[in-house]
């Protein structure tokens, strides 16, 4: 965080704290009055997910109240000293990528740790500065950092997020009937689930090959409405998707309920409509990942699971193809995700090399059938410029190029 110290006569230069939050100001004149303030306004999505929407909605409806004044402040997304449906709408826009930052709030707020809330159920008149009057000796002043929108305290306060490997082994499964489509055809994709039991929410990024398909904003004309999403069993509407990256072949989605839901496998959860620009097969051009909105599902009281898609034909699962996807974003300066789809579970190696072939980092492990993701932090790679990444297993080998910005 950035720490600001202001004296009664002048202000000291601002100071960045360490990643552990520590800070120190020396050579401060004694017998003067000072105020200290901490500021941070970056990475608004850090720690924020649809699970926070679930928890905020339960608080609003009185089903399960937020029990900490700090959590209540985190839930006040639009910064109006209240927790309401507007906060849900604003936070969902951030999750979907419609907002790149909250328009009426900062990413973090800091409150002096010494402050005692007179009413924990109405914590709004809180200070954001620590005052020192006539300082006479060395003093320690602590602050509590609150990540706005993150009511379940899952934010990582420093930037070293590390490598993360995710697979589709567990969690909510979307099931789609596989089909071959032709250029000019309207492609209706119906999403069902064989295990939609006790589900309270999900989110993720739907990826489609944008040289084969175009997401249709108006979609198919039904007798009920004109929409890109129809036949929703779970009240999944256009407000639950983000189309900011639709031209790049990515649609973000976020849905939640105030209670766990059970829906039978034959029921259509929601339908999306595309227009085919080239011939293809759904199972080869459509997947769910975490490129913008992380793929997650939530059960019961918020138990975290993955979110995946599988294709079936005549009631039988269609074997997917082995594919190594282009990392996204590319080029990148902080983190990137590499997607790997496997027809069968296998032992394999994902390795990153420089242009000379020197191995910079490798992952040797058992990989699950279906879609797998590897999130890479540039600090763990320790290199910049043009690099190559490859995946090799029994019967499958592929190589792609990525670029890390200086």
Image (cartoon, grey):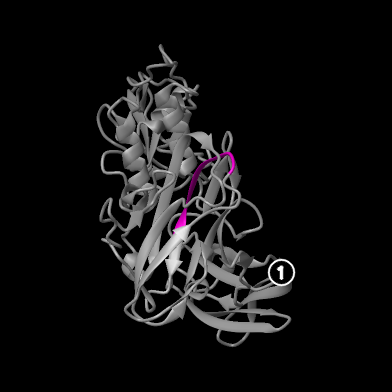
Judge whether residue 25 can be spotted in this image.
Answer: no
Near-viewer residue (6 or 299): 299
- Residue at 34 percent of width and 48 percent of height: 237
Judge whether residue 283 can be spotted in this image.
Answer: yes
Give above or below for 270 relative to 234.
below
Near-viewer residue (69 or 84): 84
Give above or below for 358 relative to 244.
below
Outermost residue toward the front in this view: 223
- Residue at 53 percent of width and 41 percent of height: 154
Q: Position of residue 126 (x, y in %)?
A: 35, 22
Give above or below for 47 relative to 220.
above
Q: Quadrant of the C terminus?
A: bottom left
Which residue has dot 1 on it? Answer: 345
Near-viewer residue (236 or 226): 226
Q: Is residue 244 magenta?
A: no
Q: Quadrant of the N terminus?
A: top left
Q: Is residue 231 left or right of residue 362?
A: left
Label 1 crowding class (10 Å Cα cut-off): few <14, some 14-19, many 20+? Answer: few
Which of the 4 quarters of the picture holds residue 57? top left
Outermost residue toward the bottom in this view: 356
Q: Is residue 394 left or right of residue 299?
A: right
Bounds of the magenta span?
A: 197-205
Q: Position of residue 304 (x, y in %)?
A: 59, 44
- Residue at 29 percent of width and 57 percent of height: 222
Q: Position of residue 276 (x, y in %)?
A: 36, 76
The majority secondary structure of the magenta stretch comes to strand
Q: Which structural element holds mark 1?
A: loop
Outermost residue toward the top in this view: 118
Q: Position of residue 6 (x, y in %)?
A: 30, 32
- Residue at 55 percent of width and 53 percent of height: 193
Which of the 4 quarters of the picture holds residue 405? bottom left
């Amino acid at each position: 965080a950035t720490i600001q110290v202001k004296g009664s006569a002048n202000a000291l230069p601002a100071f960045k704290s360490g990643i552990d939050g520590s800070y120190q100001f020396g050579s401060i004149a004694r017998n003067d009055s000072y105020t200290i303030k901490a500021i941070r306004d970056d990475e608004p999505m850090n720690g924020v997910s649809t699970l926070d929407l679930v928890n905020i909605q339960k608080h609003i409806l009185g089903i399960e109240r937020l029990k900490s004044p700090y959590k209540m402040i985190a839930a006040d997304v639009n910064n109006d000293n209240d927790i309401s449906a507007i906060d849900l709408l604003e936070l969902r826009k951030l999750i979907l990528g419609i907002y790149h930052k909250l328009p009426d709030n900062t990413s973090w707020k800091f409150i002096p740790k010494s402050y005692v809330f007179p009413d924990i159920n109405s914590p709004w008149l809180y200070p954001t500065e620590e005052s020192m009057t006539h300082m006479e000796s060395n003093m320690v002043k602590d602050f509590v950092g609150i990540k706005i929108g993150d009511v379940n305290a899952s934010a990582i306060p420093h930037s070293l997020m590390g490598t993360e490997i995710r697979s589709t082994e567990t969690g909510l499964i979307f099931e789609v009937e596989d089909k071959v489509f032709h250029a000019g055809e309207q492609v209706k994709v119906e999403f069902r689930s064989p295990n939609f039991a006790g589900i309270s929410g999900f989110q993720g990024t739907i990826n489609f090959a944008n040289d084969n398909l175009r997401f249709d904003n108006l979609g198919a004309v039904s007798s009920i409405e004109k929409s890109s999403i129809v036949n929703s069993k779970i009240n999944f509407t256009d407000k639950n998707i983000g189309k900011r990256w639709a031209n790049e072949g990515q649609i973000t989605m976020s849905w939640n309920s105030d209670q766990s839901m059970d829906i039978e496998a034959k029921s259509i959860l929601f339908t999306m409509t595309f227009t085919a620009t080239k011939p293809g097969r759904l199972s080869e051009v459509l997947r769910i990942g975490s490129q913008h909105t992380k793929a997650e599902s939530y059960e019961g009281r918020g138990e975290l699971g993955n979110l995946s898609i599988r294709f079936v034909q005549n009631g039988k699962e269609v074997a997917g193809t082995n594919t190594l996807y282009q990392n996204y974003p590319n080029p990148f300066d902080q983190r990137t995700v590499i997607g790997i789809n496997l027809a069968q579970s296998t032992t394999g190696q994902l390795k990153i090399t420089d242009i000379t072939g020197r191995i910079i980092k490798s992952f040797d492990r058992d990989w699950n059938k279906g879609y797998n993701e590897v999130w890479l932090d540039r600090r763990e790679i320790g290199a910049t410029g043009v690099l190559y990444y490859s995946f090799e297993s029994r019967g499958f080998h592929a190589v792609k190029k990525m670029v890390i910005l200086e």
